[in-house]
Image (cartoon, grey):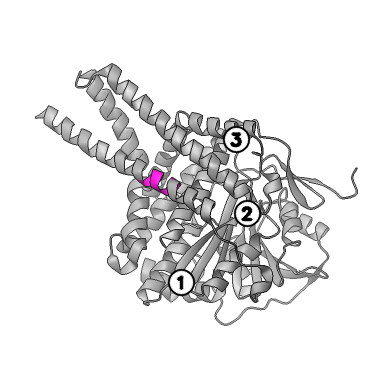
Amino acid sequence: MSVLILRIIEKLLIIYFGLYILFDIGMYVYALFFFLTRKKKLKPGDAKFDKVSVVIPAYNEEVSIEACLRAMTRMNYPDYEIIVVNDGSTDKTLEVLHNILRLEPAPVKTSNASVPTKKIKQVWKDAHLPVIVVDKINGGKADAINAGINLSEGKYICTVDADSILSPDALLNAVKPFIKNPETIVSGGQLAVLNGLQIRNNKTENTGLPKNPLVQWQIIEYIKSFLISRLAFSKINALLIMSGAFSVFKKKDLMEIGGFLNPENRHPVITSYLGPNKSTVCEDMEIVVRLWRYARDNKRKVKTAFVPEAVCWTEVPESPRNLFKQRSRWHQGLGETLWLHKTMLFDPRYGTTGLIAMPYYLLFEFVSPLIKIFALVFLAVALTNDLVHTRWLLLMIASIMLLTALIMSSVTVVIEYANARNTTGKDALRYKNFSGWMKLMLYGIVSEFSYAFFRILAQMDGMVKWIKGYKNWNKFQRKGIVIIKETES
């Protein structure tokens, strides 16, 4: 009987991991096809670009806010405003903002349809630049974004993290999907690793490949996540995650569903969907899922868009402790969002969102680390009881992992190369020659045998924190980006 149970488990695991690999390879092949065949994009003069309000929530960002603002104030976009929301920082964030800007007191202007937030203490406006600075009581990232939305005047809302830098055409490219298709509810671009970059004459440039292996692995991870999986989900109209570091929404849509989720937000849509006093440590995924849910409930035909040409550089953790906390928080947020919107799972009313995206993120993302650990334990038990041939099993596992790593890494290299030829900001890409591409592929292979296990442990920690209802955001300490002034030699 025990042998029969083991064989059943064995077959189930084979089916699970077989589907997992086929799904991933399918996304890689599709992404490769897209990058090799994509068509000419919309030009700035082809349509009217409405005003965008860029909301930058800032909590203890004294080392990064200057570089972020330098990039934002030089965007290639005809009409935009920047709203920096200082969310009760305890460092010198507000002091830095006053030093780099020419701020003058301004009135607090919000509409009757504004979303409730923590109290705003003061508002300033720059004398020459389209920049507004808001100082408010700490309420968390979602609360800070909502405060910025309340003060905004643009048709579109773009959320940007204070430790991120947009390439000059990023905003332009991210708004294009809304113009090409009015059914678009959210758009976002490619996130690239900022660590090791510097700004010279207001342009990003690299100083060589970072030596920290954790940063190298995250570079591969970001390429796979953004250039491949999110692109594929976007094309089948099932994209559930748009990075909070860089996303664009219609203000009208955000106000209809009550803005970003925080415990103080008691908008009717939020309370009817989720109940009172709900929150999440990853507001960027929840807001996209809620937009999908609200639109489909109201029988609206909508879509999301991932735009590879829109590049956002963001700082990633460099220490194992900070990286572990970040990946744990991401996985916890995934669990929270799936649970908050669990009624969408397998529901045909929500189209590919409910039938494909939600089940995929549940089965192949959220519970994946648990199944992987179970598979390792199962193999250990089978080996201990001589139920499998040890040498052949280990050889098969090593071969599958190596083959998978080779396929994923080589396709990743090709896709990154194809994207580098067409993306604004490509001068900052680290991989411009043959040795660079080989290093990229090598790091991808090595990560499958090393970093992958580290990530599994972090994700398991996130699952435990989700079960316990842990709500700490776990912000990691940033180094910032080197700025070389124009006057320096």
* Disc 1 crowd, CA 10 A, few/some/many (<14, 14-19, 20+): some
Toward the viewer: 133 or 369?
369
Amino acid at the residue labelled 1: Arg
Give the quarter of the image for residue 309: bottom right
Q: Is residue 325 left or right of residue 463?
A: right
Tell me, yes or no, if residue 118 can be seen here: no
Frontmost of labels 3 and 2 is: 3
In this figure, which residue is indicated by the disc labeled 1? 266
> Are discs 1 and 2 less than 8 Å apart at CB?
no
Amino acid at the residue labelled 3: Trp
Please, what secondary structure does the residue beneath circle 1 have?
loop
> Are discs 3 and 1 less than 8 Å apart at CB?
no
> For the residues marked 1 and 2, what is the alpha-carbon distance in whole angstroms?
34 Å
Tell me, yes or no, if residue 448 can be seen here: yes
Amino acid at the residue labelled 2: Val
Q: What's the residue at 12%, 31% (across, down)?
A: 4
Residue 443 within the segment the image draws in magenta: no
Q: In this view, does 62 lie above or below 261?
A: above
Frontmost of labels 3 and 1 is: 3
Give the quarter of the image for residue 479: top right
Q: What's the residue at 76%, 56% (across, down)?
A: 70
State whether the magenta stretch is mostly helix, strand or loop: helix
**Residue 437: mark in rendering:** 3
Toward the viewer: 61 or 76?
76
